[in-house]
Amino acid sequence: MARVLAVDDERDVLSLIALTLELDGHEVMKASDGMQGLQLARKELPDLIVLDVMMPKMDGLTTLRQLREDSSTRDVPVLLLSAKAQSLDIEVGMKAGAVGYMTKPFDPEDLSKEVARIIGG
């Protein structure tokens, strides 16, 4: 299965993402803010990043833009996960380089399906 980096500042959400994906057989690394996520992504080069949008220190859109500017992480698919559910928010996320956008609260089964779609499983 895939190596997935989950980045979210809410501990319960991060645990739910990790548990959901681990039950699907994925290896999950966790980061609690955008800066930590960016560092881990550059070091570990995951197959997929599940990235929260609203976080302290560095928000998800800034993190996504920096991932896209770095040649080592440019092609890593990013699934945005956010409480921001307006169509403009989704459009901004997709234009920043995300391959998918899910809104919170999310159904773990939907997350599993979206991850499988992105990684081709």
Image (spheres, helix red, strand yellow):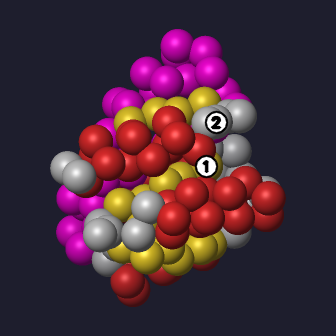
Label 1 packing within 10 angstroms: few (<14), some (14-19), many (20+): many
Query: Can residue 56 be seen here?
Result: no
**Quarter of the image where one finds residue 67:** bottom left
* Percent position of residue 84, x then y: 66, 27
- In the rendered image, residue 35, in percent from the top left (x then y), is placed at 60, 70
Three-letter amino acid code at the position of disc 1: Asp
Mark 2 highlights which residue?
106
Which image quadrant for residue 15?
A: bottom right
Quarter of the picture containing the N terminus is bottom left
What residue is rendered at 43% in x and 21% in y?
91
Magenta stretch: give its range: 71-99
Instruction: Look at the image and tell me whether residue 28 can be seen.
Output: yes
Up/down of 26 relative to 76, above or below: below
Distance from Cα at disc 2 to Cα at disc 1: 12 Å
Question: Is 90 inside the magenta-drawn segment?
Answer: yes
Q: Residues within 10 Å of mark 2 (few under 14, many from 20)?
A: some
Q: Quickly name the residue at label 1.
A: 52
At x 43%, y 76%, the residue is 27
At numbered mark 2, what does the secondary structure look like: helix, strand or loop? loop
Image coordinates for residue 78, horizontal then vertical, percent: 38, 51
Q: Position of residue 97 (x, y in %)?
A: 33, 41
- Residue 76: numbered disc: none
Q: Residue at x 79, y 63 (%)?
A: 11
First-in-chain label (2 vs 1)? 1
At label 2, the amino acid type is Phe
In the displayed structure, does residue 59 sit left or right of residue 101? Answer: right
